[in-house]
Image (tube, helix red, strand yellow):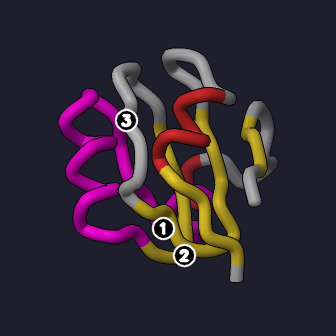
Amino acid sequence: MAEVNVGRISRYTKEGETVAVPGKVLGAGTIEHKITVAAVDFSKEAKDKILNAGGKCLTIDDLLKTNPKGTKIKLMR
């Protein structure tokens, strides 16, 4: 299972983008722009940082419900 830090997500995304992580999002690093992150799991610190930046945390199932075609989604692993 992939593990991706919030700081890495921040470096490779822009405001308003959606990211899918086929694993767990960890809290190392910072994020200061609003994004949507879908993942299998989030550490508490990662979830707090994403939400405090104005972003959203979703499960992969929730992402599939809201975007069944998977358009405009970055995959990070």
Task: For mark 1, give the secondary structure.
Answer: strand
Quadrant showing the N terminus? bottom right
The secondary structure making up most of the magenta span is: helix
Q: Are marks 3 and 2 in contact (CB under 8 Å)?
A: no
Q: Is residue 16 left or right of residue 33?
A: right
Where does residue 54 sit, x and y in percent of width and height?
Answer: 26, 28
How far apart are the two marked residues, 2 and 1, measured between alpha carbons?
Answer: 6 Å
Is label 2 or label 1 in front? 2
Q: What residue is rendered at 34% in x and 56% in y?
A: 46
The amino acid type of the residue labelled 1 equals Thr
The magenta span reads: 42-64
Query: In front: mark 3 or mark 1?
Result: 3
Query: Which mark identifies residue 44?
Result: none
Cβ–Cβ under 8 Å for marks 2 and 1: yes
* Separation of marks 3 and 2 at Cα, in angstroms: 20 Å
Identified at 39% across, 31% down, the residue is 31
What residue is disc 3 on? Answer: 30
Out of 75 and 9, give the one closest to the viewer: 9
Mark 2, Cα crowd under 10 Å, few <14 / some 14-19 / many 20+, is some
Tell me which label, 3 or 1, sits earlier in the chain.
3
- The residue that mark 1 highlights is 59
> What residue sits right under mark 2 in the picture?
40
Quarter of the picture containing the C terminus is bottom right
Q: The residue under label 2 is which amino acid type?
A: Val
